[in-house]
Image (cartoon, grey):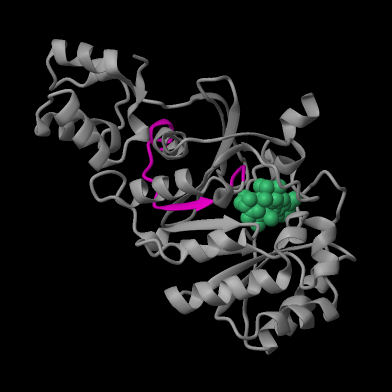
Amino acid sequence: MSKKNILDFSYEELMAYMTEELDVKKFRVDQIVDWIYDKHVFEFQEMSNLSKDFRDFMDEKFFVGIPEPIDIKTSKIDKTTKFLWELRDGNTVESVALFYPKRVSACISTQVGCALKCAFCATGASGFTRDLTPGEIIAQVLAMEKIKNIRINNIVYMGMGEPLLNYENTIKSVKMLNDKRLKNLGGRHITISTSGIVPRIEELAEIPIEIRLSVSLHAPTNIQRDKIMPINHKYPVEELIQACKNYQKITNKRVTFEYTAIKGFNDSEDDARNLAALISDLKVMVNVIPVNDNPAGFEKPSKRFLDTFARILINKGIDVTIRAEKGSDIEAACGQLKKRFIEKQ
Ligand code: SAH
Ligand code: SF4
């Protein structure tokens, strides 16, 4: 029988499997969980309160699926750190740790590549290879904590891939990050970002953890959105907004709209007014992100355009932030992950 990745098991699954199938005592399971999730020890042989026989037994049955860091880059400007991981099958994904005065935030990946091919996104340009397992998703967090000797207290699913197209594994990873016995992170410190997979947004409203939802809108009309986000042909703007309304009706939570601002494409005063009208019935926050370096060659709007754009929204009573770019010197910003590897191919 092949070894199992212990990180793919929820707490309940691990307890049931180890006590019922492997005949291990309950407290032993808790010791192992504590070593992995609290002490960040990922080798059974280093778990010093377990007998040698039991450590060998664990090595026979399981492995702790921590990825290999093959490249770590730290920004000289703001300490933002980008990690390139090698998975067991040789595929690679990236994660980013972002340092703020009182917290550390991690941006994690859910897929190797992405099938959705948004025009401005380097991950999309690399195509889709496969989904990550729940263990591969949470391992990014554990590995960053261990390498940098930090505790991550905020997680955004904004790395490579579309989380809601890897729905089951993403939700399982969220539950495990939230589980008091595992990572113990509150739902309000977990954000899922989606390009707008309408049926899954409605499902997400029903999960028992109150996470934050971020929707990558980027354009206020179908004509514009079709041009930069092929997924819009399947789930057009009006359906997406309706899904957000349904989500809000159930969760009563504010939704964040990500708006990647592109010079001469979606940054005009009319665009701002159209956007304000589109979301007027929703409790929202709009995050304007000047587009980062991208495969399509789109350019950032000038500061004057961004300020005018934001001012129009603010005057309509909408909360707006213009996102400060972090890690720009190491290409760690949204949509830049995997870029270097595409260039190499
Ligand atoms: N697939 C999900 C989550 C990963 S992308 C999604 O699309 O939401 C995370 C965020 O980065 C999204 O809002 C995405 O639109 C944005 N993004 C991608 N490429 C970008 C770029 N070149 N500049 C700015 N934001 C970008
Ligand atoms: Fe995929 Fe998100 Fe990139 Fe679009 S922006 S290609 S959905 S990762």
- Dividing the image into 4 quarters, which one contains the N terminus? top left
Residue in the image at 52% along x and 66% along y: 202
313 up-or-down from 141: above or below: below
Residue in the image at 36% along x and 44% along y: 151
Of 241 and 102, nearer the camera is: 241
Of 51 and 112, nearer the camera is: 112
Q: Give percent across and percent down for residue 81.
A: 55, 39
Horizontal relation, residue 308 to residue 188: left or right: right
Q: Quadrant of residue 271?
A: bottom right
Q: Which residues are magenta?
A: 145-161
Residue in the image at 37% along x and 34% along y: 8
Task: For residue 82, say whether it is visible.
Answer: no
Q: Give percent across and percent down for residue 283.
A: 55, 80
Horizontal relation, residue 24 to residue 239: left or right: left
Q: Is residue 280 magenta?
A: no
* Number of residue marks: 0
Horizontal relation, residue 296 to residue 75: left or right: right
Q: Which residue extends farthest right? A: 264
43 up-or-down from 109: above or below: above
Q: Give percent across and percent down for residue 277.
A: 72, 85
Task: For residue 303, say whether it is visible.
Answer: yes
Q: Is residue 146 magenta?
A: yes
Q: Give percent across and percent down for residue 88.
A: 50, 20
- Dividing the image into 4 quarters, which one contains the C terminus? top right
Q: Quadrant of residue 291?
A: bottom right
318 up-or-down from 259: above or below: below
